[in-house]
Amino acid sequence: MCVLRTTLVALAACLAVHGSVRAQEEQEEEEVVEAAVLKAPSLRPDAHMHPPYPADGDGEPARVLLQITIDAGGRVREATVLSVDRERERAARFSELALQYVQGLTFEPATQDGEPVPAMVRFEVFFDPPDHEHVEAAAPHSPHHHEDAARTLDNEAAQGDASERSSVPFSATAVVAPNDISASAIDLTGQEMRLRPYISTGDLLNAAPGFFSIQHAGGGKANQYFLRGFDADHGTDVAFFVDGVPVNAVTHGHGQGYTDLHFVIPELIQRMEVRKGPYYGEYGDFATAGAVNLVLDSEKPHNSLSLGGGTYRTFRGLTILSPKTDRVKPLIAVEVFGTDGPFQNPEDLLRVNVFARTSFDLRGRTKLSLTGTAYINDWNASGQIPLREVQSGNLDRFGSIDPNEGGQSQRYSLYMSIDSPAKAGAAGKRSVGGEGLSLVGWVTHSRFALYSNFTFFANDPVDGDMIRQGDNRTTFGLRTKYGFVHRFDRVSLKSTFGANFRFDAIDNTLQDAPAREVTNSRADAEVGEGSVGVFAEEELSWKWLRLIGGLRFDYFGFNVDDRLEDTSTPGTKTSGERAQGIVLPKASLITQPVEPLELFFNFGRGFHSNDARGVVLGTNPVTPLTAALGWELGARVIAWERLELSAVFFWLKLDSELVWVGDEGTTEPNGETRRIGIETQFRLQIMPWLLADLDVTWVRAEFVNNPGNANAVALAPELLLSGGLTARDERTGLSGRLGVFYIADRPATEDRFLTAEGFVRVDASFGWDNERFGIQAQLLNLFNTRWRQAQFATTGRLPGEDSPADCPSGTRPVTEPDGAFVGCEDVHFTPGWPIHFQVLATVKF
């Protein structure tokens, strides 16, 4: 058995028999790092797996360079292929075997002052054919680096036996990954997410503990997001990013923070970073309940063509091209998706996505990438139908009141990103490598038109109440972050600074449009909205203690030109300018009193911006920036290399809640709210190929200044539960998951008169994959549960409802102050899909 010894800049080891593993040295000659402060991971002595040479190989040695993430328990959490010395199908074959190999390895974790910490390393897998005569590898690229590494080996390594010293040397750069600052933070790999059933990217968000995402009003409208007791509508209180580019749309025609993720191709997601609460300095607008960043791939180990379909005339095609070149890495993907859904009024949805990225390796470890995306979507919708009509038998649950609902959406983007990891400091400065510099700049253009009828015939008893919401915008901006670490004896200080700039040029419209024919404009405004944010964080680490303090400042400017402004009536000003800034302190404390227990305390202030059209009103303007204040206590245990358990208690106060306005299909500010809740996460590796998970979230959400029985936050989820069994056998390529999701009943109105019904849904998926082919099958809603997706308490009026007496039991009549009948307040909902089947077959080349 080989023994692997490590230091920060070198891994020295051997593997006998047919497989030997290497890592590649990448530090430049001027980098000098003090030993005995930080050590990279090492293979544990009981590591027994060796990479098999494929039977269909070409008989020559092969090398695959990987980047692997190793957690503080020594487990491989993520592996990505960086390069392989083969082309086409052989490259894919060796890449897959290398990935399988490292997933089976266990490591002694990286240490900082003797304490285990997460790490990322460049790791090379070397394949020897069975009849190949082993030849000792050449010395590392930089001889003096190798000598420095040898001088920093511990005594045991220096005194190893001759067989170990004569074995194959190899070296690598080990980069300590940022530690989590809260027990609720989680990173999920794209591979892990895609083991769960999904139709679009929004479905993949459900892999995050405590997160619930649903689709409603047709498959082209943005998802509705639930997190930490927030019905965040389409993104008001959750900040979304893709590769660091913000997605939430400010002052959107349909709702503040509107976030449509349909432009993201699920197979391109490398990982999802979930950060809950307002404790992170780098996240500003909308990051009250939390923030989500989807990181996309820059290359794939092979080209592929996928075709599939399923029930309800669903079809999907996907092509991914990832040519292999030396320094330039192109990646192109095209997706086409369509479905009619189970509705009597077919969705007739057609979605097309195009993704193109070119990545460059510049001097040192700096990487530059240019990315372009194009997205178009066209669909019909059955809308949100009244529960009373379904219960009476007059309307099928998959029927429609207004068959003209639907919309069109387009989005085009171009962005550039630069990632330059920090170099180690010069000798004598007592510093080590830190985060370095990251920068992303973008420009996007989007066009959106949504036809909806929320109230049916309440406003127009003859032609109906259909409205058209329009939003056309161009957005450009820049986000950057720089970090470095200094050491003073046994104390390290990590400094992080960042800034962001964004400007949106927006055209908003709201029009009456019965049968999609525009008859009247209710709103027509040109909006310019800009923002600047800066933040600084300092992290002090000493043995088992970490202290983090941060400060963020954001400044927003709003300019609204209302084309329909009534200038003849005093006090009706709807155009104008306004600006406001906000200061956001952040603080965290993390300690590990005993292994393997970690304790966390987090505190922070966050905010979401409000619609510019309400901000500049002459009378009763809304506050430009709504502040949130939150804290949480958390504990996490990672034990026996098989168990992960965390529990969090959190508290959050929001100065003003945005609530649903049915007749306009948007939201408006209401009173101050408070949320308290508990989250638990559980993961158990039952067998090497079998994982069990269970996540439970309970939240109490209520208005602060509305005592009595009318203080519930409508539609706020109170109890969420998700769990399942996931199986994956790397040797056979088989995988599958059986999962369950539960959401409890929740109030649909502040006084709890109406209830949004909960449900239990079970889904299953199956996959098989090898070097040439793959197949993915999923059975959603396995037990054919009758469940509801979007649910709203809405006042609407149907034919024959002419007075309060016409409102059936279980609904509530609504009248004007003068007694005029408006309609019946009832639950309007979009039905969840019944049992349905999807399959996708893939050919790799």
Image (cartoon, rainbow, N blue to C red):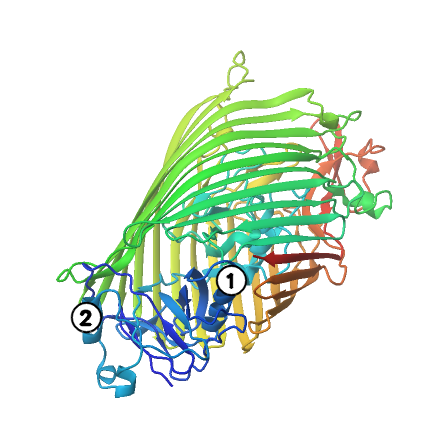
Indicate left or right for 480 with 304 as reference: left
Q: Residue at x 46, y 56 (%)?
A: 273
Disc 1: CA contacts within 10 A as few (<14), some (14-19) or many (>=20):
many
Residue carrying label 1? 92
Q: Nearer the viewer, residue 408 or 7?
A: 7
Whole-angstrom CA distance, mark 1 to mark 2, is 36 Å
Residue 87: % across, % down: 47, 59
Residue 658: % across, % down: 55, 41
Question: Mark 2: which amino acid?
Answer: Asp
Q: Quadrant of the N terminus?
A: bottom left
Residue 322: % across, % down: 49, 52
Name the quadrant containing residue 598. Answer: bottom left
Question: Mark 1: which amino acid?
Answer: Ala
Q: Nearer the viewer, residue 719 or 491?
A: 491
Indicate left or right for 151 with 731 as reference: left
Q: Secondary structure at mark 2?
A: helix
- Is residue 536 something one can see in this rendering? no
